[in-house]
């Protein structure tokens, strides 16, 4: 079992910045993929950014150049630096862990943290 604890989030004006962090705990020696997803009101949950133990990263087109994902493999933590925030970035941001490279169905989710971009 993996527990994910998120921190960060809040209210920020357009053009501002926020940093989200997620720490994983549990009986996991090394988690293959960690990342962030978000869900806006009335919309489906979508990928924001992910990173793997091989340092491969993947970003949604809408956040490329503005968001940066980083990871500490030794500590099983992942952070998301969000710059130049837009109102459309508003939503609940979830940390997700996929422990095993060949197992696409074993996923763990955090409780979510609210990000609101508004003037």
Image: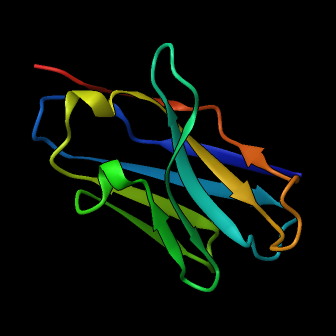
- The answer to whether 53 appears left or right of 21 in the picture is right
Q: Looking at the picture, how far across and down is residue 10, in whole percent?
A: 32, 29
Find residue 30 and report its image quarter: bottom right
Is 63 displayed left or right of 73 in the figure?
left
Q: Residue at x 74, y 70 (%)?
A: 31
What is the residue that sits farthest to the top in this orientation? 42
Instruction: Give how far across and how far down residue 29 sits, in percent.
Output: 82, 76
Q: Position of residue 62 (x, y in %)?
A: 32, 48
- Whether residue 98 sits left or right of residue 105 in the image: it is left
Q: Which of the 4 image quadrants contains residue 14?
A: top left
- Among all residues in the image, which is located at the extreme front? 61
Above or below residue 118? Residue 24 is: below
Residue that appears at 80% across and 65% down: 99
Model colouring: rainbow
Name the residue: 65% across, 50% down.
Answer: 96
Question: Which residue occupies the foreground of this view, 53 or 11?
Answer: 53
Compare residues 40 and 78 and report the one nearer the observer: 40
Image position of 33 with respect to 72: above or below:
above
Quadrant including the C terminus:
top left
């Amino acid at each position: 079992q993996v527990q994910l604890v998120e921190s960060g989030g809040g209210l920020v004006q357009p053009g501002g910045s926020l940093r989200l962090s997620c720490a994983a705990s549990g009986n996991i020696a090394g988690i293959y993929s960690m990342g962030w997803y978000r869900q806006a009101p009335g919309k489906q949950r979508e990928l924001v950014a992910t990173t793997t133990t091989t340092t491969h990263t993947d970003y949604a087109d809408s956040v490329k150049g503005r968001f940066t994902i980083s990871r500490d493999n030794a500590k099983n933590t992942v952070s998301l630096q969000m710059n130049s925030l837009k109102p459309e970035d508003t939503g609940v941001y979830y940390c997700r862990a996929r422990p095993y490279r060949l197992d696409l169905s074993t996923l763990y989710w955090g409780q979510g943290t609210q990000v609101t971009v508004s003037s």
